[in-house]
Image: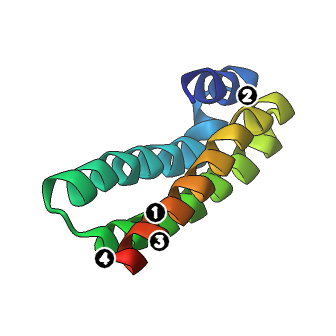
């Protein structure tokens, strides 16, 4: 994630990368919030909603990074897949409980 952000920033400079880095910051906050919601509050449904927003934010970041650097965008692909998998696990746990 950090390498992708650095690559996006260094490819065209901060001014050009600022919107993409802002969305990147949002997805970092959503990522941190998921742990707190799921493990701290024990609210799997709310955590699942957070994961949906996180997945959308990651996809948006990936697409914005692609415009700056294809490598930066592709570096986020495993993260997007991982969050999709985590969402499936989160949904299954919510459903079973």
User: 58 or 83, which is in the foreground?
Assistant: 83
SS class, disc 1: helix
**Sequence order check, earlier mark of 4 and 1:** 1
Of the two numbered discs 3 and 1 in the rendering, the one whose residue sits closer to the viewer: 3
SS class, disc 3: helix
Q: Are marks 2 and 3 in contact (CB under 8 Å)?
A: no
User: 96 or 34, which is in the foreground?
Assistant: 96
Q: CA distance from mark 4 to mark 3?
A: 10 Å
* Residue annotated with mark 1: 51
* Residue annotated with mark 2: 12
Which residue is at a point 82% across and 29% down the rendered structure image? Answer: 71
**Sequence order check, earlier mark of 2 and 3:** 2
* Residue annotated with mark 4: 97
**Sequence order check, earlier mark of 1 and 2:** 2
* Residue annotated with mark 3: 91
**Could you tell me residue 73's position as x and y percent?**
76, 39
Residue 53 visible in the shown view: no
């Amino acid at each position: 994630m950090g390498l992708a952000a650095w690559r996006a920033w260094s490819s065209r400079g901060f001014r050009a990368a600022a919107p993409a880095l802002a969305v990147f910051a949002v997805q970092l906050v959503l990522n941190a919030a998921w742990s707190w919601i799921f493990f701290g509050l024990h609210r799997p449904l709310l955590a699942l909603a957070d994961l949906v927003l996180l997945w959308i934010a990651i996809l948006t970041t990936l697409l914005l990074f692609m415009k700056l650097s294809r490598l930066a965008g592709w570096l986020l692909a495993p993260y997007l897949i991982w969050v999709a998998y985590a969402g499936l696990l989160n949904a299954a746990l919510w459903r079973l409980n």
